[in-house]
Image (cartoon, rainbow, N blue to C red):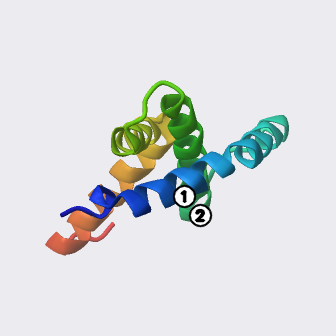
Amino acid sequence: MGLLDDTQIQDAVDDLLSSAATSNERLMNRLLELEWIPQGEAHITILALLLTISSYNELRNESDDVQLCLFNAYVKAMENPTISRYMAKVAASNIDNSLGVSK
Protein backbone atom coordinates (compact mmCIF):
# COMPACT_ATOMS: atom_id res chain seq x y z
CA MET A 1 0.00 0.00 0.00
CA GLY A 2 1.40 3.35 -1.01
CA LEU A 3 1.34 6.36 1.24
CA LEU A 4 -1.22 8.18 -0.90
CA ASP A 5 -3.55 5.17 -0.94
CA ASP A 6 -4.74 6.31 2.51
CA THR A 7 -7.69 8.69 2.07
CA GLN A 8 -6.86 10.63 5.24
CA ILE A 9 -3.36 11.30 3.92
CA GLN A 10 -4.79 12.27 0.53
CA ASP A 11 -7.18 14.69 2.23
CA ALA A 12 -4.39 16.19 4.33
CA VAL A 13 -2.07 16.62 1.32
CA ASP A 14 -4.91 18.15 -0.67
CA ASP A 15 -5.76 20.55 2.18
CA LEU A 16 -2.10 21.54 2.54
CA LEU A 17 -1.50 22.19 -1.16
CA SER A 18 -4.87 23.88 -1.68
CA SER A 19 -4.40 26.20 1.27
CA ALA A 20 -0.96 27.19 -0.03
CA ALA A 21 -2.26 28.33 -3.44
CA THR A 22 -2.72 32.02 -2.63
CA SER A 23 0.55 32.43 -0.75
CA ASN A 24 2.33 30.45 -3.45
CA GLU A 25 1.03 32.74 -6.19
CA ARG A 26 1.95 35.84 -4.21
CA LEU A 27 5.48 34.57 -3.63
CA MET A 28 5.93 33.53 -7.27
CA ASN A 29 4.78 36.94 -8.46
CA ARG A 30 7.16 38.73 -6.12
CA LEU A 31 10.09 36.57 -7.17
CA LEU A 32 9.31 37.35 -10.82
CA GLU A 33 9.16 41.07 -10.02
CA LEU A 34 12.61 40.78 -8.45
CA GLU A 35 13.86 38.88 -11.52
CA TRP A 36 14.93 36.03 -9.23
CA ILE A 37 17.28 33.49 -10.76
CA PRO A 38 17.39 30.31 -8.68
CA GLN A 39 20.94 29.21 -7.97
CA GLY A 40 21.97 26.34 -5.75
CA GLU A 41 20.13 23.53 -4.07
CA ALA A 42 17.97 25.64 -1.73
CA HIS A 43 16.76 27.90 -4.54
CA ILE A 44 16.06 24.94 -6.83
CA THR A 45 14.11 23.25 -4.04
CA ILE A 46 12.02 26.40 -3.53
CA LEU A 47 11.38 26.66 -7.28
CA ALA A 48 10.33 23.00 -7.45
CA LEU A 49 7.99 23.46 -4.50
CA LEU A 50 6.42 26.59 -5.96
CA LEU A 51 5.89 24.95 -9.34
CA THR A 52 4.49 21.77 -7.79
CA ILE A 53 1.97 23.70 -5.69
CA SER A 54 0.93 25.84 -8.63
CA SER A 55 0.56 22.89 -11.01
CA TYR A 56 -1.22 20.79 -8.40
CA ASN A 57 -3.89 23.42 -7.86
CA GLU A 58 -4.38 23.93 -11.61
CA LEU A 59 -4.73 20.19 -12.14
CA ARG A 60 -6.93 19.77 -9.09
CA ASN A 61 -9.46 22.17 -10.61
CA GLU A 62 -9.85 19.65 -13.44
CA SER A 63 -9.77 16.34 -11.52
CA ASP A 64 -10.79 14.74 -8.24
CA ASP A 65 -7.87 12.28 -8.32
CA VAL A 66 -5.42 13.63 -5.73
CA GLN A 67 -2.74 11.03 -6.53
CA LEU A 68 -2.82 11.72 -10.25
CA CYS A 69 -2.79 15.49 -9.74
CA LEU A 70 0.18 15.26 -7.38
CA PHE A 71 2.09 12.96 -9.72
CA ASN A 72 1.45 15.19 -12.74
CA ALA A 73 2.34 18.33 -10.78
CA TYR A 74 5.65 16.72 -9.78
CA VAL A 75 6.35 15.75 -13.40
CA LYS A 76 5.61 19.29 -14.59
CA ALA A 77 7.99 20.72 -11.99
CA MET A 78 10.76 18.30 -12.95
CA GLU A 79 10.29 19.25 -16.62
CA ASN A 80 11.18 22.86 -15.85
CA PRO A 81 14.48 23.57 -17.64
CA THR A 82 16.18 25.06 -14.57
CA ILE A 83 15.21 22.11 -12.41
CA SER A 84 15.99 19.44 -15.00
CA ARG A 85 19.44 20.95 -15.69
CA TYR A 86 20.20 21.00 -11.98
CA MET A 87 19.01 17.41 -11.51
CA ALA A 88 21.16 16.28 -14.46
CA LYS A 89 24.17 18.07 -12.96
CA VAL A 90 23.62 16.40 -9.58
CA ALA A 91 23.16 12.98 -11.22
CA ALA A 92 26.34 13.40 -13.28
CA SER A 93 28.26 14.47 -10.20
CA ASN A 94 26.98 11.47 -8.22
CA ILE A 95 27.99 9.11 -11.02
CA ASP A 96 31.43 10.70 -11.24
CA ASN A 97 31.85 10.42 -7.48
CA SER A 98 30.78 6.77 -7.44
CA LEU A 99 33.34 6.01 -10.18
CA GLY A 100 36.06 7.96 -8.40
CA VAL A 101 36.29 10.60 -11.11
CA SER A 102 37.38 13.98 -9.85
CA LYS A 103 37.23 17.23 -11.73
Is 56 placed left or right of 97 in the picture? right
C-alpha distance separating marks 2 and 1 = 5 Å
Report the disc number at residue 3: none
At a point 42% along the width and 55% down the height, the residue shown is 10
Give neighbour class at mark 2: few <14, some 14-19, many 20+ (Cα, 10 Å). few
Q: Residue lying at the far top in this picture: please name it.
A: 62
Residue 60 vertical position relative to residue 89 in the rendered view, above or below: above
Return the x and y of residue 84 as percentages of the image width and height: 40, 42
* Residue type (three-letter) at the residue carrying disc 2: Ala
Residue 47 vertical position relative to residue 80 in the rendered view, above or below: below
Q: Quadrant of the N terminus?
A: bottom left
Return the x and y of residue 70 as percentages of the image width and height: 41, 44
Residue 63 vertical position relative to residue 84 in the rendered view, above or below: above
Report the disc number at residue 42: 2
Out of 90 and 69, give the one closest to the viewer. 69
- Secondary structure under tag 1 reads helix
Return the x and y of residue 35 as percentages of the image width and height: 78, 38
Out of 62 and 45, give the one closest to the viewer. 62
* Residue type (three-letter) at the residue carrying disc 1: Thr
At a point 52% along the width and 44% down the height, the residue shown is 52
Mark 1 lies on residue: 45
At a point 28% along the width and 71% down the height, the residue shown is 102
The answer to whether the residues at label 2 and label 1 have Cβ atoms under 8 Å apart is yes
